[in-house]
Image: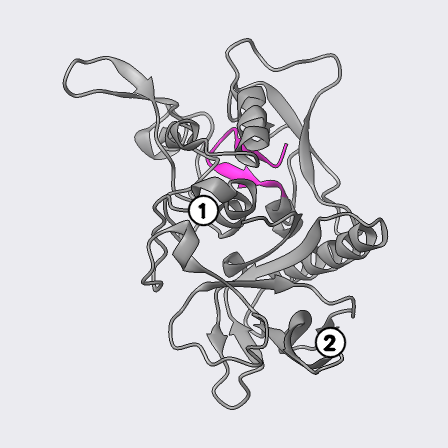
Amino acid sequence: MESARDKNTKEIVEAEDLWMLPHVDRDGYECSGCEQPVYPASYLKTNLKRPHFSLFPKTDHLGDCDVDGERKTVDSGRKGSVRNELETSPGLSPSRLILKDERIAVDPTLPKSSAQTGSKSTTRTNSNDGATRPAGRRPSNTIRPICRAFINFPFDRNMSLDIPGIEDKTYLTAFKKLGAANAGIEHFSRSKVFYAEVAWAKTQATDDSLVIQLSAGEWNAERQLVRKYMLRICWSQWSNYKRTKVQNEMEVVREEGIKEKKSKSKKRAYVFFIGEQDEQDPTYFNVTDHRLICGLVGELSW
């Protein structure tokens, strides 16, 4: 499972975010669909494998859990439109990005409040007839679920998407791939969710930044990349946990990309980010928030 619910805060937790936590509570998570306990795996900072959540041995999802249904929706979404399912699946295709300053701290012994359960509800009331119907699309606190939806549902990229600072309001228009054919190094006047394949070169880390080479930029007539776009993570003010999380994720996605390419797979490793193009050197993009970058492996289709 790529995400689970924190038992105390009732917030959805992306598995990759476990890399950033100083302490991971093995018994602190539950399935977001049925509340069955799940445990975090492969989250140690030494693991070069993506964190994930799993059911405990000899347990299974409860009867009304929609996790299997969501997996089927993802499979179907790669072949055709599944808009109706996405409109009633809270986590598969986030409607907007909301960056929270702090994670809500909750005493688990206190009665549940709306702040604790706001992201938990799977139904809502129809004001006309009082009947309940599945909850709609929920917001995301990082760009990762948004980028995952962009990969998973190519036939539904006309769905709405609201990201602060980005004028375009659909998945189709809010994303921009770097390195369009024969475009060279472009100058971008509008903010987008930029993305590109990750180069095979390892990242370069200093106290001030992490630099990631992208397999996109200016190509010569022999199809050699002569000027690469570069992604600079400006992390001088970040905690060690945030640095570790981003650096681990970038190394994992790089290794995954190499493996997929060597196996002749159609999947590729991509880095997605929201950042500012450097005024002095347009080959560089600067990112200042760990929630505005992610690495994912998938097959992008149009």
From what the image shows, is residue 176 above or below residue 73?
Answer: below
For this rendering, which residue is in front, 275 or 181?
181
The type of residue carrying mark 1 is Arg
The answer to whether residue 115 shows anywhere in this view is: yes
Outermost residue to the left = 128
Residue 90: horizontal and vertical position, in percent? Answer: 42, 32
The type of residue carrying mark 2 is Arg
Query: Which residues are the magenta region?
Result: 1-15
For disc 1, the neighbor class at 10 Å (few under 14, some 14 to 19, many from 20) is few
Which colour scheme appears in the figure? one colour
Per the model, the C-alpha gap separating discs 1 and 2 is 47 Å
Image quadrant where residue 208 sits: bottom right
Count the numbered circles shown.
Answer: 2
Check disc 1 and report its element: helix, strand or loop: loop
Residue 300: horizontal and vertical position, in percent? Answer: 60, 50
**Disc 1 to disc 2: CB gap under 8 Å:** no
Q: Which mark is residue 103?
A: 1
Q: Residue at x 61, y 64 (%)?
A: 196
Residue 100: horizontal and vertical position, in percent? Answer: 40, 52
Mark nearer the N terminus (1 vs 2): 1
Q: Depth-wise, is mark 1 or mark 2 nearer the camera?
A: 2
Residue behind mark 2: 223
Q: Residue at x 53, y 20 (%)?
A: 35
Check disc 2 and report its element: helix, strand or loop: loop
Outermost residue to the bottom = 280
The answer to whether residue 101 shows anywhere in this view is: no
Q: Which mark is residue 168?
A: none
From what the image shows, is residue 241 above or below residue 211?
Answer: above
Instruction: Tell me if residue 259 is in the magenta stretch.
Output: no
